[in-house]
Amino acid sequence: MSAHRKEEAGNSLAFRTPVGGQSLQAGESMNLTEDFPNGVNVRPYQAIRIAGGSRTSSEGNVTLSIIMTIKRERFVTLDTIEVSPGQAFNNVYQVPGLGIEILAKADMHPGPATIDVAVFGYNPERK
């Protein structure tokens, strides 16, 4: 997993999966944000955009759970997104809380599924 921070015109890249995507085997579950013990810090942002998708080469669906965290505790599920091979998503959440975790679970299918996910934060006071 990889975290990159790039700030420009009020926007920051708070998290992204590795270049080349994150592969999951059939039935595998994974915390995409495991490198962030308290979750990805979203405290500085007025809104966050979570964008991503499943590669066309994926062989099954992946379900993503976006979970709000408070320190090391999973507090509540903010959203659940199911992506099929070749499908993309782009969702904005207002006042997202303190932190988020992104959990991924691959359906049972014959081969791997590869996903890409990025979290962008927006703070209008950050120039």
Image (spheres, rainbow, N blue to C red):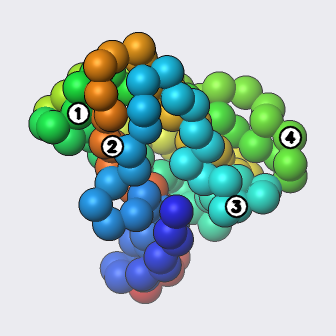
**Badge 4 amino acid:** Glu
Q: Eyeballing the image, is 25 above or below 123?
A: above
Q: Secondary structure at mark 4?
A: strand
Which residue appears at 20% of the width and 41% of the height?
A: 55
Alpha carbon distance from label 2 to label 3? 19 Å
The residue under the point 54% across, 56% down is: 46
Per the image, label 2 sits on a secondary structure element best described as strand
Numbered circle sitting on residue 115? 2
Circle 2 or circle 1, nearest the eye? 1
Query: In the rendering, at what x and y percent does residue 61 appear?
Result: 32, 21
Element type at mark 1? loop
Can residue 83 be seen here?
no
As drawn, the label of residue 58 is 1
Q: Amino acid under label 1?
A: Ser
Instruction: Name the disc covering residue 73, or none.
Output: 4
Q: Are marks 2 and 1 in contact (CB under 8 Å)?
A: yes
